[in-house]
Image (tube, rainbow, N blue to C red):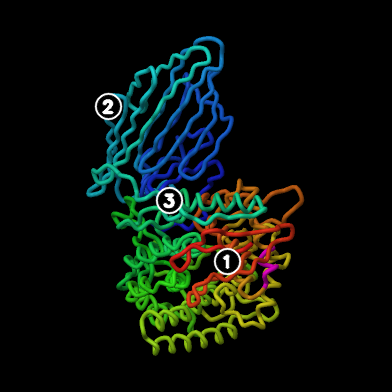
Amino acid sequence: MQLPDRETETLEWAVSVVSPGAYAVSDGAGDFDAGAGGLYYRDTRHLSRFVLEVGGERPVVRGREARGTAAEFLLEAAGLELVRRRRLGHGMEEEVEVRNPSGRAVEARLSFGVGADFEDVFVVRGFAGRAERGEVVEEVREGGLRYLYRRGGFSRGTEVRAFAEGAEPVAGSGGIHCLLRLGAGQRRVVRVSVALEEGGERVRAAGRRGAPYAAAPALETDWEALRRSWERSVEDLAALTFDAGEGLLVPAAGAPWYMALFGRDALLAAYGAMILTPEPARNALRALARWQATERDDYTDAEPGKIPHELRRGELAYFREVPQPYYGTADATPLFLVLLEEHRRWTADEGLARELEGAARRALDWLLAHADRTSGGFVAYESRSPAGLRNHGWKDSDGSMLFRDGRRAGGGVAPCEVQGYAYDALLRTARLAESAWGDAALAGRLRDEAGDLRERFDRDYWMEDRGCYALALDGEGRKVDSVTSNAGHLLWSGIVPEEKAPLLARRLLSEEMFSGWGIRTMAEGEGGYDPLSYHNGSVWPHDSALIALGLARYGFRKEAARVAAALVEAAERFGYRLPEVFGGERRREGEGPAGYPSSCSPQAWAAAAVPLLVRALLGAEPDPEARVLRSGPVLPEGVRGLRLEGVPAFGGRHAVGG
């Protein structure tokens, strides 16, 4: 059984409602009855069937809206109007308001079809077979149903109870129903409560729901689309927050399939959220340090000092039918060091850097001594696990590492952006060694290592004829010569020499790379280009946002504003919520960007893209020594003002912009 890449599901029908505990995936009526729909908790589907019917018929959908932990569905059936309200927390609460708009009394049978298969999320997503399957037991109770599942030491449970005004709900195998009598113009409310069990214990509320974002800065601007996108992003980041253990509230990667701790995702989402709050960064760093690898294990692609890629809690992970924790990531370890120093920059507090010094030194040791290397000494990867991912960069789908002619790169692949992250990590860790650890000798050595890496990287990756850095080096040291967005991350990390930056900026904003809605993952015209592929021509908001921040870093502020404007306009077309990924077709008058069928929404990277864009537009950068936030806004044409009030930094609150 192999871990999936992220290019497998079709979710265009789905309505996702997420919370720090459970999450639900339904159709437009709020039902789940087939395919991937269901109520999930910790990688297990606790309800596989939950279907509302009136008089034996499913209602017609008249409208719907999902925001964060709640959703509302407007329905009609048998001449009745229904408002179905759903809220998630450590379980699910549902309220169905039934209205009789007619001038006569009516009688209606309202029913909920219920079922629980307790399937593992990996199996739901299309895996063939499993080693063993436990038994689901259904118990019919007064007004409700209880389902229990056990396999060895793994057990889960679900209890569904209904309550109705003026009626007595009746439960039977596979469902609950009640007979409602409504006078002319009358309304009745039916409530359903779904409680979850894990290991024989009732699941309780998961921490302070959305607490890290409760005091997020207020955005003031005449740019309405940005303001609404900002509010939606803060809301989504709060909803995606979950307890990773010991009360550490961290960003889950995304709904519906990645409601778990992912190293790269948590680190980049927390980095983007630094302008909102430092708490997700602090918690993500502590949580990931707890799972840092201590020894080599080829089944999980673990190596000493490596930060994990993915931590799952379902049945397959419990019985190690999938490698867990899984360490197939080449970039989470340098990004761990990047975020640790970024936290110090924004807080001027070296306490966390001292607390995690051991983990940071082990991560550094992996970067310098244990990481796979090309013959040129660059950080590379090669999956050893038979059940692992083929590619260990952020573009982790099987076909993401392609030469210009469309051939796949093989051997120990060294992605360009990972070298940039490593360079940034070395310089940032040098600052930590100096200021927090009192180790001047280490700081000097790391700066020398960084300088050497920068020189070698520019020599070996630059493609003079293409005005861009190569996507990667393959196992034989050959340039993987596609033009891709990966090169844009090099501006964010600072590894690009000043004289090359204008050439790279020009390439990134060329017609082949810039779709009008964002920067494509691969340039139009490359052998592997497909605007509706996962990683070879689509647009990823977090990718474009990091590039915008990199452009701003090198002084290309107008170019950064152009990218920001495009993404905000795309967000407007998606209901002010940027999805994980969308199509990379060239922008046309009167048409919006194409949705991607398996795109997660909400997704932590995408939600964090909006604060990254605001940071790039404001030019907001912390100066911990002076304890000031420096800024100098450069805004898109037509935007008159942009200001943030209450930005947390250095233990206080600050205003930036104007």
Q: For the residue carrying disc 1, how many other residues have a C-alpha within 10 Å: few (<14), some (14-19), or many (20+)?
A: many
Q: Residue at x 35, y 21 (%)?
A: 169
Residue 568's tag is none
Amino acid at pointer 1 = Leu
Residue 141's tag is 2
Q: Position of residue 429 (x, y in %)?
A: 43, 79
Q: If the image is split into quadrants, where does the N terminus sit?
A: bottom left
Q: Which residue is mark 1?
A: 546
Q: Position of residue 316 (x, y in %)?
A: 33, 53
How far is the residue under mark 1 from the one under mark 2?
Answer: 53 Å
Q: In the image as oriented, which residue stretches furthest toward the top?
A: 104
Question: SS class of the residue under badge 3?
Answer: loop
Displayed quadrant of residue 463: bottom right
Bounds of the magenta segment: 556-562
Along the polypeptide, which appears first: circle 1 or circle 3? 3
How far is the residue under mark 1 from the one under mark 3?
Answer: 24 Å
Question: SS class of the residue under badge 2?
Answer: strand
Nearer-the-camera pick, 436 or 406:
436
Q: Is residue 560 magenta?
A: yes
Q: Is residue 611 above or below residue 168?
A: below
Amino acid at pointer 2 = Arg
Nearer-the-camera pick, 147 or 198:
198
Along the polypeptide, which appears first: circle 1 or circle 2? 2
Of tags 1 and 3, which is closer to the observer?
A: 3
Q: Which residue is mark 3?
A: 210
Nearer-the-camera pick, 620 or 654:
654
